[in-house]
């Protein structure tokens, strides 16, 4: 890289060293009089795609496109996702799922592999029945049964400990330790199930993962889009959830420092069986669960001191069914890292939280619908990439670069998104 170009880059991006610029892949043979802006855009587009492991998902539906990405540049992500298709007696389905792990990856990783199988079994069990409420119950039941089986698998393993052996000997076996970690780590989940042939949509969620739907307003000559969030957050910021927990445990101090038993922000989760079992069971098992953060030991002590009448967590998903409209429809499934990082990196002037939230989710649908930025036609080919890039700074290449590489690690939470684009027959006028 010429001295002139290096000076231009370092003037524009003073916090980056020459080594960091080279890590971004800048060509050492750039002409002196070439401005760095276009190259910045190209390199950033490529880098975001690689960092976020952006994928286009292949499936049998000709009028459906889906893509996904998950970004956490600074440490191993605890988020997981999957996109699958089901062919059953009741129809052909597209399933998309985002799983936001917390306290460790084990519960989320296991759910990624096995929760779709459990849901499929529940759907197959209803046979040719295609009533929407039956499918809703099957979806909810699949999630709850999966969580119960986590606990049953651990109980089964522990119950087989011979009298002469100790728990320590038992948990030295890798398979048994995995069962313990799946139970004591946790995860939030959002699931989208689409029966494309009938334009039926089911959404299931618990915790703070979310689903957003957008479609063109019928008869709107301006081509405007109607955008809605289809899920409600289940965490301690939701007054209804806090009220529910307090009503279930009257007189107890179960919400401590805005966390359930001082431990988790979400109020409905997979795993987290330390908040579902009696503390007499949990206490001895804690000795075999590795710490993931320095604050873990005090949090465990506080939980055991305040756990009087478990369970404090539930795995009952909210499920809703809707008929999707004709024309173009966009579905976005995301972990809470998408809105959290968007709000942190794109501060707005709204004083009203609802208006701010609405502007944010509308911006994601605009990202799906926009064309790739100039110079990024080959690097910004999926809707998921465009959402992630726009969250990081959009057209402001310097801002994107700062947010991806900043030493202060502004991208604090795992950011995971699935974008689904559907095209249905236009409604007859």
Image (cartoon, rainbow, N blue to C red):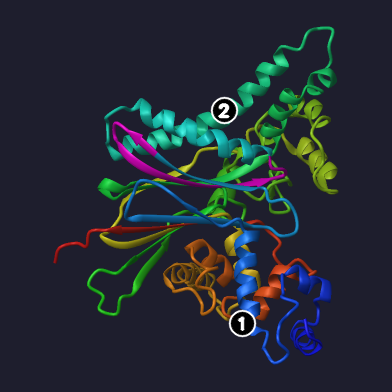
Q: Which residues are magenta?
A: 86-105
Residue at the image point whose x is 69% and y is 17% from the top: 157
Q: Which mark is residue 148?
A: 2
* Quarter of the rendering containing residue 249: top right
Observer-nearest residue: 304 or 189? 189
Horizontal and vertical percent position of residue 361 = 48, 67
Whether residue 145 is visible to the viewer of this picture, yes or no, is: yes
- Count all numbered tags in the image, as a single digit: 2
Give the vertical position of 184 relative to 266 (above or below). Answer: above
In the rendered view of the protein, which quadrant contains the C terminus?
bottom left
* Quarter of the rendering containing residue 84: top left
Residue at the image point whose x is 49% and y is 36% from the top: 116
Q: Is residue 181 left or right of residue 374?
A: right
Q: Is residue 101 magenta?
A: yes
Q: Main secondary structure of the magenta part?
A: strand
Pointer 1 local density, CA inside 10 Å: few below 14, some 14–19, many at least 20: some
Observer-nearest residue: 378 or 254? 378
Q: Earlier in the sequence, mark 2 or mark 1?
A: 1
Q: Is residue 197 left or right of residue 25?
A: left
Observer-nearest residue: 35 or 101? 35
Residue carrying label 1: 38
Whether residue 17 is visible to the viewer of this picture, yes or no, is: no
Q: Is residue 194 left or right of residue 389?
A: left
Give the vertical position of 153 relative to 232 (above or below). Answer: above
What secondary structure is marked by label 1?
helix
What secondary structure is marked by label 2?
helix
Q: Is residue 168 magenta?
A: no
């Amino acid at each position: 890289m010429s001295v002139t170009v290096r000076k231009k880059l370092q003037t524009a991006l003073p916090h980056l060293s020459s080594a960091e610029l080279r890590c971004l892949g800048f060509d050492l043979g750039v002409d002196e009089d070439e401005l760095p802006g276009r190259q910045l855009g190209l390199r950033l587009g490529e880098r975001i795609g690689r960092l976020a492991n952006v994928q286009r998902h292949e499936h049998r539906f000709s009028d459906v496109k889906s893509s996904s990405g998950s970004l956490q540049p600074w440490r191993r992500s605890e988020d997981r996702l999957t996109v699958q298709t089901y062919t059953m007696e009741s129809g052909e389905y597209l399933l998309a799922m985002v799983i936001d792990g917390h306290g460790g990856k084990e519960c989320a990783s296991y759910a990624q592999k096995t929760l779709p199988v459990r849901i499929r079994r529940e759907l197959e069990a209803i046979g040719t029945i295609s009533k929407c409420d039956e499918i809703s119950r099957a979806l909810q039941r699949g999630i709850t049964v999966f969580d119960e089986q986590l606990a049953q698998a651990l109980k089964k393993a522990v119950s087989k400990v011979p009298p002469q052996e100790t728990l320590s000997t038992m948990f030295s076996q890798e398979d048994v330790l995995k069962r313990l970690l799946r139970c004591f780590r946790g995860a939030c989940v959002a699931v989208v199930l689409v029966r494309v042939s009938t334009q039926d949509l089911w959404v299931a969620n618990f915790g703070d993962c979310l689903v957003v739907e957008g479609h063109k307003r019928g008869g709107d000559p301006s081509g405007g889009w109607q955008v809605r969030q289809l899920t409600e957050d289940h965490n301690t910021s939701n007054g209804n959830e806090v009220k529910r927990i307090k009503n279930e445990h009257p007189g107890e101090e179960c919400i401590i420092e805005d966390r359930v038993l001082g431990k988790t922000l979400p109020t409905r989760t997979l795993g987290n069986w330390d908040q579902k079992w009696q503390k007499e069971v949990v206490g001895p098992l804690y000795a075999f669960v590795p710490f993931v953060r320095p604050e873990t030991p005090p949090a465990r002590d506080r939980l055991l001191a305040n756990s009087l009448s478990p369970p404090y967590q539930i795995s009952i998903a909210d499920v809703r069914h809707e008929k999707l409209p004709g024309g173009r429809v966009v579905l976005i499934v995301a972990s809470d890292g998408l809105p959290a990082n968007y709000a942190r990196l794109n501060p707005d002037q709204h004083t009203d939280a609802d208006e701010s939230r609405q502007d944010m989710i509308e911006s994601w649908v605009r990202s799906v619908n926009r064309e790739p930025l100039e110079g990024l036609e080959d690097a910004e080919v999926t809707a998921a990439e465009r959402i992630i890039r726009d969250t990081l700074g959009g057209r402001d290449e310097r801002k994107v670069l700062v947010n991806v590489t900043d030493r202060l690690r502004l991208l604090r939470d795992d950011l995971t998104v699935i974008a689904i684009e559907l095209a249905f027959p236009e409604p007859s006028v």
